Amino acid sequence: MATQRIQHKRVTWTSIVKATPDDIEALREQYPHFHPLDLEDLLSRLERPKLDEYDEYLFTVMHFPLWDPVQRISRASEVDIFLGTTYIVTVHDGTLKPLVQLFERCQKDELAREKYMGTSASRLFHTIIDQLVDYLFPILYKVDANIRDIEEDIFDRDARPIIRDIAVLRRDNIALRRIVRPQLEILAALDRVDKRYLRGGGDDLEVYFDDIRDHLNKAADTISDHTEVIANLADTANTITNQRTNEIVQILTIISVIMLPLTLISGIYGMNITLPLDDHPLSFFFVVCIMLGTGGAMLAYFRWRGWI
């Protein structure tokens, strides 16, 4: 079982990492008023973000991004939170570092326990969400750094890896947007909750949750800005690719056009019929000169027209 508890004054924090059916059964026995459907959601692989409000507790499902360095994409990591007047229960898979580190600090440090758990469970609830939201920004800063790298190299590097990098960056940004947007609805719903477990210890948490929502809105706006910049980079890369393709096609077309009369001349003189200069000892030299002259004249004409 991966269940740990911290008790400080009136507040109990129960942390369950990688919940098993035994963990859920133990939680059911400790808190028999938890709704069976909420307990069932704890074992779901990835539950949709939501907020369920009851008279005695609040059940929240939230997602936060976790960077996958192999696939180069941010994946949703779920945290389920039960909030009561004197307790809080967190269920997660152990990959969200801010949550893991906060629990460890409260375990080991008396000052941390007093700071985060000394007032009320609702203050601890705010601290958990606040630190998880702040964890978004290093990921967004990394996306911003990748965008700047592409902007610096887009005119110098080969187009194919640039286009691939832009596609990977766009996919990651879309994943971040899909993770962050539903959390805005959760924060907005918290403003409408008027229960004693969100007013514990006399704290005016509405202002604090408004601050978290401002940070989350900032993250969402940053993702929207990244979406626009990435789209412009993709258009630029496509334009550069099309331009380089046109240049290659132009060169190949010029070569083909020059070869047409040369092929015609060599074809005529390859016919088994009587032609001028057939008996001349320098006939091959004359034919080569005619072909070279024709090719040179065509190149000069193309240059004069500005086609090459």
Image (cartoon, grey):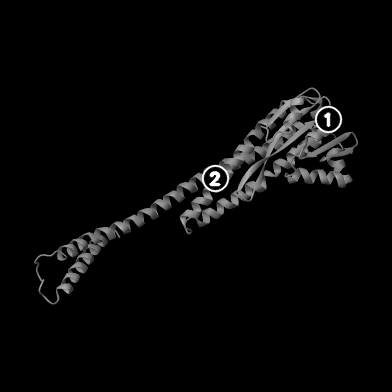
Which residue is at a point 60% across and 52% down the rendered structure image? 145
Whichever of labels 2 and 1 marks the residue nearer the N terminus, that label is 2
Which residue is at a point 64% across and 33% down the rendered structure image? 182
Q: Nearer the viewer, mark 2 or mark 1?
A: 2
Task: Measure the alpha-carbon separation of dots 2 and 1.
Answer: 43 Å
Q: Which residue is mark 2?
A: 170
Amino acid carrying label 2: it is: Arg
Q: Which residue is mark 1?
A: 200
Q: Nearer the viewer, residue 294 or 180?
A: 294
**Does residue 296 show up?**
yes
Q: Nearer the viewer, residue 55 or 77?
A: 77
**Does residue 202 show up?**
no
Q: Are marks 2 and 1 in contact (CB under 8 Å)?
A: no
x%, y% of residue 69?
63, 51
Q: Quadrant of residue 96?
A: top right
Describe the element under mark 1 as helix, strand or loop: helix
Q: Nearer the viewer, residue 38 or 26?
A: 26
